[in-house]
Each structure stands twice: as structure tokens, then as C-alpha cells.
Image: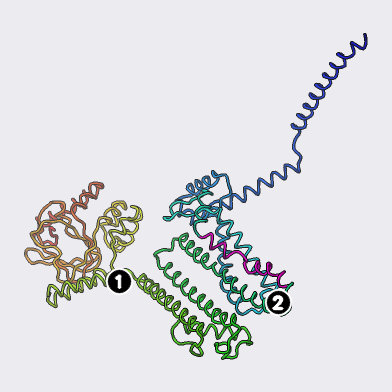
């Protein structure tokens, strides 16, 4: 009996125990899960989160004058930062601080490489020294890192209005663009070739090994020249910085382009000088080459470089053949290549220099072109000499040797900027005119924006008696004479104005105004006059009161100095 009953009892006990153990394990696990995280783990997570935030910050566009110019405001920069975060991957923004300083480092590194590498390949006796290998390996490593970073850097669109941040688009465009050139210039092909050939050189016979080693050295020097393809990166970086600084059409851009061109010419002279010595060296200095004829095969590197650079510059500037004319076929071809490169650089330099000279004073050049057309017109119409002289005097005093499309320039500006410029240009007129000194500043500003500058020569008739009044005039500089019906004269000078009464009465001119000197006046048309006075009725009443006083004076005393103009 007991044996029969023991089975079910033990089975239930086991099941109950297993369930109890499982429940205790779950409870223990839940308690462990609810236990607070250790201080070390929390500190580690906080540090990792902090470093991620810092890295994300330096990869995003910063608030600087370049990003503000691109995105318009701080709010626009913040929106661009959120757009970078929305991709969820590490993307380097081209306007980020990290990319700016990285490009600056790479720029100086490329300049150093493009100068040092040709010299080292040509004039260094042993390229396997520790300093030389460290320099090459460090440069290759940084260029490979830059190659990788280019896959994660945003790309400016052609019109510089949008930045591509999609990693797939960036990768596709870079692979289709400059990737191959950058990759070839970053791989240390010469060191790889030497490492592969090392075993074969050790196993070869002594004589064969020596001859083979010489050929390998020459071949590695040629392979080292692949690093000079980094010149394409330098040109791209300089062009990218010009676009970032928006130096496209101004004088600073022209100066920088000429400096870049001069630097490029000096770099090509340096390369050509190294090439002039490298080719004979690869041929074991034949007896009829210029190095052997000048006994410089065993000279110090500074003497060799100086003579090679002298020959290169002589060829590129087309002023001679250096120490002597070339005799060997390779020297002839090198000379021709140097002359072609030099002539091309000379033509480019002349073009950039001409653009620079023209951009120095574009307004004066525009004035000269305009006046040439005027001279041709006067000659075609066969105008008399005195009239030609008056036209010449008018252009000299009206434009003073410079011509601007002022209406177009001011039309592109905001209203506030336009008002500030006009107020500054007419500050002398405002200070000399009592009417403006006591008037509402807003009225003065609006009135100045309606004025049109005019110039009259001595003897010119500004207003003719009996004509309809269409303008009033403000005298900035010069003297005019008002001639009435009874030939009575009145002289007005700087700070005076005339012609306003006819604009109020819509009558005809009752006097003639003649310029006595070269006069610089500002005119206000009747439409602009009425438009301004509609906005300022108080000034209309002031003008009407002045006009009424002048009319009363004329009715009381016909010989009064007041004149209805």
C-alpha cells in the first residue's frame, strides 16, 4: 500500500518544488533587475553619452558667419542640425568645426607633400631612412583617413543652396568622382612593391641581386610619383574654401586667384626642376647629359637642385636653355614639355592679371567705355567744337570719371538701407537747408528718396518763363540767378530751393532761372511732391503758407524779391 501511494505523492512534491523554485528564481531575478545600477556602470554610461554628444556636436554645423550666410539665421542653423540628427548615422557636415580644422590640417599637409616628395624622390640618396619613412607613412595614413571621411561628409550642391547628407548618395557620388585618384595617391605602392620583392632579392645571387636592386630602386622612385596626384585634392580644397568664403567676383577673390596661380607656377617650376635631374639619374647619368657635362653627378643636393631649377625656369620662361642647349633626345623632349607648361602658365597669369586690373576700378572703366560712345556719336553727328566741349564738361562734372547704375543698386537694397544711403549722400544738403532742419525727420527721409540728382553748366537755363511747373529744385552746390519779367535778378546759392509754388498752384513759371556756375541740384517731380505731402499734411500746410506769403508780397510790392516759380 505505501508503495502505491508514494508515487503520486512524490510526483506532486516534485512538481510543487519545481514550480516553487522557478517562482523563487523569477522573484530573485526581478529583485536583481529592480536593484539600482552600480556607480561604476552609471559613470561609464554617462561618460559614453557625454562623448557621443560632444562628437555629434563637432560634426554638426556650428553657428559661424559661414553657416549663417548659408542658412540665413540661427534658427536655420538649428534646423540644419536637426536634419543632420534625423539621418541617425555619423555624418560630417561640411560647415562643421571638425571639417574646417581637418581641411586646414590636410591643406598644409598636402602643400608639404607636394614640395617635399619630389625633392626627396630626386635628391635623397636613401629613401629607406627612418625620418623619411615616418613622414611617408604618416602622410599616407592621414590621406587614407581623409579618404574614409569623404564617404561621410556632406556634399554641396552645384548652386550651393542645398547640402546632401544621405550616406548612399554621398558614397555614390564620391565613387563616381575623385575616389580613384584619391585612392591611388593615398596607397604606398612603392613600399608595398619593395616588401613583395624583398624575398626574391634575398634569394638571388649577389651580382644579380645588386643589378635587380638598382632597377627596383628606380622603379619605386617612379611609383612614388603617384603621390603627386594629391595636387588634385589641393585644387579641390582651395576651390571649396573660395566657395565657402564666397570669394567669387570681388577684388579679394581676384588677388587670391593670382596668388594661387603664382604659387602653382612656383610649384610647377619646382617639379620641373626635380624632373630635369630625375630623368638623367634614372638613366645612370649618360656622358652627354647636362649633369655629367657639368660634373654634378656627385655634387651636393643643393648644387644639383639649384642648377636643375635654373634650367627648368629658363625653359618655362622661354629665355634660354639653361647652361647649354639639350643634345640627348630625352633632354629635348623635357625642354619642349617645360616650354609648353611655361607658356600655358604665362597665358593664364596674363588673363588673371588683366581681370584683376579691370576689377580694380570697374566704374572708371565703364565710364571710359560710355564716353567713347559719346565721342563717336559727336563725331558721327559732326557737332561743333564748342558743343563738344560743353558735353565733355557735363560728363566730367556729372559723373566725375565714374559711372554707376545707382537706381539698380539702390533698388536691390532694403528700404531701410536705401534710406540710410540717401540720407548719408544728402547730408550736406540737409545741413545747409533750414527747411529740413525744422521738419519731421521721417518727412525729410522720404523726401530725399524721391530726389533726382542733376547737373547744370554755367549759362544753362534751369527754368524757363511761361512753362508749366513740373519740378522744384534744391541747390546742393552752385549759384543760380532768377530773372523776373522786369529783368530784376535774384541770386540763390547752397541750401536754397525754388520752383515749389507752381507745384502747389499748378500754374506757369513767371521767371527764368539760369545757372551762373557749375550747379549740382536735386530735383523733385510734381508727382513725387504730391505723394510725399499726402503722407505729411502738416508739411503741405507749411509749403502753402510759404507760397501764400510769397504771393502776398508780390501783390503788395511787384518789385519784391519774391518770385512765383
Q: Which residues are magenta?
A: 178-201
Q: Are the residues at dot 1 and dot 2 in contact (C-beta closer than 8 Å)? A: no
* Residue 263 appears left or right of 517: right
SS of the residue under disc 1: helix
Instruction: Locate residue 322 relative to residue 132 in the image: left or right.
Output: left
Asked if residue 256 lies left or right of residue 18, the reply is: left
In percent of width and height, residue 350 lies at: 39, 76
Q: Residue 236 placed where, x, y %?
A: 49, 63
Q: Earlier in the sequence, mark 1 or mark 2?
A: 2
Q: Nearer the viewer, residue 244 or 16?
A: 16
Most foreground residue, 319 or 328: 328
Q: Height in image: 516 above or below 40?
A: below
Residue 285 location, quadrant: bottom right
Depth check: give the residue in front, 430 or 21. Answer: 21
Q: Position of residue 18 (x, y in %)?
A: 82, 22
Which residue, as the protein is rendered here, is positioned at the far right? 2
Quadrant location of residue 401?
A: bottom left
The mark tally for this picture is: 2
Per the rendering, the mark at residue 347 is: none
Most common SS among magenta residues: helix
Circle 2 SS class: helix
Task: From the image, tell me which residue sits under label 2.
Answer: 209
Residue lying at the far top of the rendered structure: 1
Tell me the crowding category of disc 2: few under 14, some 14 to 19, or many 20 or more residues within 10 angstroms, Cα based: some
The residue depicted at 43 percent of the width and 84 percent of the height is 318
Q: Is residue 43 above or below residue 3?
A: below
- The quarter of the picture where residue 206 lies is bottom right
**Magenta includes 517?**
no
Nearest to viewer (mark 1 / mark 2): 2
- Residue occupied by mark 1: 365
Amino acid at each position: 500500500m505505501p508503495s502505491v501511494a508514494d508515487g503520486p505523492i512524490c510526483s506532486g512534491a516534485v512538481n510543487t518544488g519545481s514550480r516553487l523554485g522557478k517562482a523563487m528564481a523569477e522573484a530573485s531575478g526581478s529583485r536583481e533587475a529592480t536593484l539600482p545600477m552600480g556607480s561604476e556602470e552609471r559613470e561609464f554610461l554617462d561618460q559614453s553619452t557625454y562623448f557621443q554628444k560632444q562628437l555629434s556636436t563637432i560634426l554638426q554645423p556650428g553657428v559661424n558667419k559661414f553657416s549663417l550666410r548659408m542658412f540665413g539665421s540661427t534658427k536655420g542653423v538649428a534646423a540644419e542640425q536637426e536634419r543632420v540628427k534625423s539621418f541617425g548615422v555619423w555624418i560630417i557636415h561640411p560647415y562643421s568645426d571638425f571639417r574646417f580644422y581637418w581641411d586646414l590640417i590636410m591643406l598644409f599637409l598636402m602643400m608639404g607633400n607636394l614640395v617635399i616628395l619630389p625633392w626627396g624622390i630626386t635628391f635623397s640618396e636613401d629613401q629607406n631612412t627612418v625620418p623619411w619613412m615616418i613622414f611617408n607613412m604618416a602622410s599616407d595614413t592621414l590621406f587614407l583617413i581623409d579618404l574614409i571621411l569623404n564617404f561621410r561628409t556632406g556634399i554641396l550642391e552645384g548652386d550651393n543652396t542645398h547640402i546632401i547628407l544621405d550616406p548612399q548618395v554621398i558614397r555614390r557620388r564620391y565613387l563616381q568622382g575623385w575616389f580613384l585618384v584619391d585612392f591611388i595617391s593615398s596607397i604606398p605602392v612603392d613600399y608595398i612593391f619593395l616588401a613583395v620583392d624583398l624575398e626574391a632579392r634575398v634569394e638571388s645571387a649577389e651580382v644579380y641581386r645588386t643589378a635587380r636592386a638598382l632597377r627596383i630602386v628606380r622603379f619605386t622612385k617612379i611609383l612614388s610619383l603617384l603621390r603627386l596626384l594629391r595636387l588634385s585634392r589641393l585644387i579641390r580644397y582651395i576651390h571649396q574654401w573660395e566657395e565657402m568664403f564666397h570669394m567669387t567676383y570681388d577684388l579679394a577673390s581676384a588677388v587670391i586667384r593670382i596668388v594661387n596661380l603664382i604659387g602653382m607656377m612656383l610649384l610647377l617650376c619646382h617639379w620641373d626642376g626635380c624632373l630635369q635631374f630625375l630623368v638623367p639619374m634614372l638613366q645612370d647619368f649618360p656622358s652627354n647629359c647636362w649633369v655629367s657635362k657639368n660634373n654634378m653627378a656627385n655634387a651636393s643636393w643643393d648644387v644639383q637642385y639649384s642648377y636643375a631649377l635654373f634650367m627648368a625656369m629658363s625653359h618655362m620662361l622661354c629665355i634660354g636653355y639653361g647652361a647649354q642647349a639639350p643634345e640627348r633626345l630625352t633632354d629635348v623632349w623635357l625642354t619642349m614639355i617645360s616650354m609648353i607648361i611655361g607658356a600655358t602658365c604665362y597665358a593664364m597669369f596674363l588673363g588673371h592679371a588683366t581681370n584683376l586690373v579691370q576689377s580694380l576700378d570697374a566704374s572708371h572703366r565703364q565710364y571710359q567705355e560710355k564716353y567713347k560712345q559719346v565721342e563717336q556719336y559727336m563725331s558721327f553727328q559732326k557737332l561743333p567744337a564748342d558743343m563738344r566741349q560743353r558735353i565733355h564738361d557735363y560728363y566730367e562734372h556729372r559723373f566725375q570719371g565714374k559711372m554707376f547704375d545707382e537706381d539698380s543698386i539702390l533698388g536691390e537694397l532694403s528700404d531701410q538701407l536705401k534710406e540710410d544711403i540717401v540720407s548719408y549722400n544728402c547730408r550736406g544738403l540737409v545741413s545747409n537747408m533750414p527747411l529740413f532742419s525744422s521738419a519731421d525727420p521721417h518727412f525729410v527721409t522720404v523726401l530725399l528718396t524721391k530726389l533726382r540728382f542733376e547737373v547744370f553748366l554755367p549759362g544753362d537755363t534751369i527754368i524757363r518763363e511761361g512753362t508749366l511747373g513740373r519740378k522744384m529744385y534744391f541747390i546742393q552746390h552752385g549759384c543760380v540767378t532768377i530773372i523776373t519779367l522786369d529783368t530784376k535778378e535774384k541770386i540763390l546759392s547752397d541750401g536754397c530751393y525754388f520752383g515749389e509754388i507752381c507745384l502747389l498752384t499748378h500754374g506757369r513759371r513767371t521767371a527764368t532761372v539760369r545757372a551762373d556756375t557749375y550747379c549740382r541740384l536735386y530735383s523733385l517731380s510734381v508727382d513725387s511732391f504730391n505723394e510725399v505731402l499726402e503722407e505729411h499734411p502738416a508739411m503741405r500746410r507749411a509749403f502753402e503758407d510759404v507760397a501764400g506769403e510769397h504771393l502776398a508780397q508780390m501783390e503788395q510790392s511787384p518789385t519784391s524779391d519774391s518770385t512765383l516759380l
